[in-house]
Structure formats: C-alpha cells, structure tokens
Amino acid sequence: MTAADVVIVNWNTGRYLRACVRSVGAADRSRLRVARIVVVDNASTDDSLDGLSADGIPVDVVRNEDNRGFAAACNQGAARGRSDFVLFLNPDTRLHTDALRAVGRFLDTPEADRFGIFGALMVDEQGRPQISCSRFPGLRTYAGRMTGLDRLLPALFPPHHLRPRELTRSGPVDQVIGAFFLVRRPLFEALGGFDEGYFLYLEEVDLALRARRAGWPSYHVHEARVRHAGQVSSGQLGPWRHYLMLCSRSRYAFRQWERRRAWLLMALTLAVEPPARLAAAALRGQWRDLGPTLAVYWRFLRWFSEGRGLGPPPRPVPRRS
C-alpha cells in the first residue's frame, strides 16, 4: 500500500494543532497509509505541543530553539521519514474522514503516474469551498493586486488564487496550496526540498514551478476535503506579515522570472505599492497604520539591498523523459 509521512510545522497554533493531528489518526487510511506524523515546532510559546496523539500513528515532535521559518522546518520534518510520499499539512487544517482515502484511490490510477504533487479541496466549517489552488504568479498578477485592477479587470490581471467557482472538479492545476501538499519523496529530494531562502510564503509555489519544469505537474483531487481555518499562525504577525510576503515575492521573481521583469516588479513594489497602501489607510482613517507601513517597506528595502532577495538560481533538475 502507498504510504506517506505527514509533516506539520507549528508556531503557536494551540488547539488547532491538536485537532489536526487527531484528524489524521481518525481518517480512513485504507488506501493511503500514514507511517508517521512529524511535528516541527518553531519555538512556540503556547501549549501547542501538549497532548498530541493520533490513533495508531507514531507522533515525532521536533522542537526548534528558534523560529527557522516554514520552508526550513518543512525540510527538517521531511528528512525524518522514508515513505514514498510526504504530506505537508498546515496545523489549522482538519482532514475529513475520507480525505486520505480519496487521494489514495487516485494515486492507484494510471493517470496519477503523470503527476508529482497532489492537493485537496479546502472547505470552511460549513463545508463551503475555499481557496485550494493557484496560478503561477506573473508580473501582471502582482501589478493587478497592487492597484486593485485584478478585481476590476481580472481577464487582464488574473488573480493569483483560483476562485472556488473556477475549480469544480479534479484535474491538473498550476499549484495546490501548501495547507495540504502531497509530494512524491523522490521528486522532493531531487528538487532539494523547499528553498530555505523563503521564510514564509511562496515556498510551495516555487517548488511546484520547479517540479512542473522537471516534468512533474500538480493535480487537484476535488473529492478529498480538508477543513482549513487559515491564517492562524500568520495572523499573529501583524504588519510584518506583509514584510515577509514582500521578501518572498521578490525572491520568487528573481529566481523564476527573467531579470527585466523581476526588476520591474521591484520598481512597482517601491514606487506604486507604498503610496497606494498609505492612501488607502488614510482614506479609512487608520492613521496608526501609516508608521508601521513605512517601516515594513524600509525594512524590506534594507533586506533586498543586502542581496538576500536575488539569491542563486535554482539548481537544474533533469526533465522527466
């Protein structure tokens, strides 16, 4: 039977983590066996790690003294298993009982052999579909988001995420979101895992694009349902959440786009986005947000000027024959 190691990276998610781990133990594993659950804790200060258990599955807890970031912690957890697949789960997810069975059933089909990464349908507490998959972002994606044109002219400025109404069945997609990210271990290792230059955000987009270029696209399994609360960890970051997105965005652009487009994104990021965000805050009367917004862009500019946004290009991976 196909087996997977589950990796969950935690930072102060409290009861959500315990519910996530329990849901893996309660899931139907008749078509996809879970060999172990690895929880990598990035220096949490709450009670997240208390009482972790999953019916019939060993739980391995790794405690980092410092917050190493999401990508690095994912790689750390993946290295502790040997199963053919690695399933990265967000701690604010809960598997529906039949989620693993649905994915395992698809993995047993000849069609699945063409794909390297698999995702599930995210739903809210009422079972309504949420964001589950995304497009590979380009310059127009970010330009549209900075200016609001992605809402006014979505055909010209396509948003990053696929809306639930655009995703009504199983099939190939650019990228499945990292909340439920099942990847073939040999592929993950051949790609060198997640790029640890991403502290948070876009690390799974980067990996999915590199996998696609190596001949291993991603697939959305619509029948596999996963409850996703969303932003439980990142919501604690306040304005620095946007700083981390800026860092990841620039790294993605300079690693994956031609340099001319990447530099144009930087110009828009520094010349267009800050005035737009400041004006929006002022119009809403949120005067206290002006200082933190400026601080975020100043810190980002310092980070980029140190050369950390450019980074080396990803290592080449032979295309699948």
Image: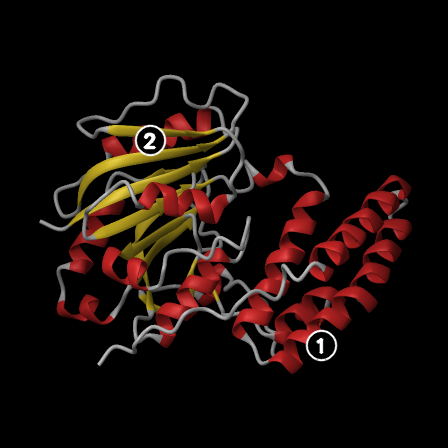
Up-down relation of residue 294 to residue 14 (above or below): below
Identify the residue shown where x is 52% and y is 28%. 12
What secondary structure is marked by label 1?
Answer: helix
| Residue nearer the viewer, 50 or 101 | 50
Q: Identify the mark at residue 102; answer none if there is no mark.
A: none
Q: Position of residue 50 (x, y in %)?
A: 40, 17
Percent of width and height locating residue 256: 52, 73
Residue pictured at 70% horizontal, 39% vertical:
238
Nearer to the camera, 25 or 199: 199
| Whether residue 189 is situated above or below residue 284 in the rendered picture | below
Q: Position of residue 42 (x, y in %)?
A: 49, 33
Residue occupying the point 53% across, 36% down: 67
Asked if labels 2 and 1 touch by Cβ distance under 8 angstroms, the answer is no
C-alpha span from label 1 to label 2: 43 Å
Name which quarter of the figure residue 173 lies in.
bottom left
Which quarter shows the C terminus?
bottom left
Q: Earlier in the sequence, mark 1 or mark 2?
A: 2
Callout 1 amino acid: Leu
| Residue wearing tag 1 | 264
Q: Which mark is residue 21?
A: 2
106, 187: nearer the viewer: 187
Mark toward the viewer: 1 or 2: 1
Q: Is residue 260 left or right of residue 134?
A: right
- The amino acid type, in three-letter code, at marker 2 is Val
Q: Is residue 279 left or right of residue 299?
A: right
